[in-house]
Image (spheres, grey):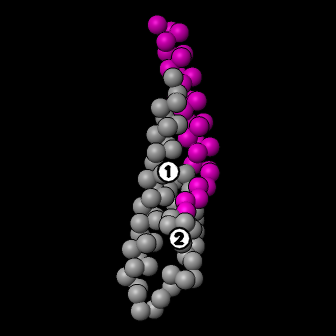
Amino acid sequence: MQSMMAEAQRMQKELQRKMDEFKAKAFEYSYKNGAVVVIIGGDFTIQSINIDKVLIDPDDKKTLEEMVSEAVNAAIKGVEEDQKAIQNSIK
């Protein structure tokens, strides 16, 4: 019983260490071949958004807004998937 508790504590510490490292990382997601590039932290903070200047059309604001929104959502989904993989890697 005691060895099970020790193993559980070891696993918890390992998961916490990996999650702390993950949160400190930055991830880059390119949307539509680099038209919009989002850099997002492992803690889900958006660090930067780079928009290709060919997309900046004052007469078509809606398309740009949609692309930025889609790029940010894709970046968040990617970080969530990476985070789940780390959580599932602790055995």
Q: Nearer the viewer, residue 88 or 21?
A: 88
SS at badge 1: helix
Q: Is residue 49 visible?
A: no
Residue 69: percent from the left, percent from the top?
41, 69
Residue span colored magenta: 1-30
Q: What secondary structure is the stretch in magenta mostly built from? A: helix
Residue type of the residue flagged with mark 2: Val
- Identify the image quadrant of residue 54: bottom right
- Kindly identify which residue carries mark 1: 79
Residue 66: percent from the left, percent from the top?
39, 74
Q: Nearer the viewer, residue 18 or 70?
A: 70
Residue 38 as seen in the image, left or right of residue 77? right
Residue 47 as seen in the image, left or right of residue 77? right
Is 24 magenta? The answer is: yes
Q: CA distance from mark 1 to mark 2?
A: 17 Å
Q: Is residue 48 visible?
A: yes
Residue 77 as seen in the image, left or right of residue 33? left
Which residue occupies 59% across, 37% down?
18
Which residue occupies 53% across, 9% down?
3
SS at badge 2: strand
For label 1, the crowd category at 10 Å Cα-Cα, with few meaning under 14, some 14 to 19 and many 20 or more, is: many
* N-term mark: 1 or 2: 2
For label 2, the crowd category at 10 Å Cα-Cα, with few meaning under 14, some 14 to 19 and many 20 or more, is: many
Which residue occupies 62% across, 43% down?
21
Q: Is residue 73 above or below residue 88?
A: below
Residue 62: percent from the left, percent from the top?
37, 82
- Res 36 label: 2
Q: How many marks?
A: 2
Is 26 magenta? The answer is: yes
Residue 8: percent from the left, percent from the top?
50, 20
Q: Residue furthest bottom?
A: 59
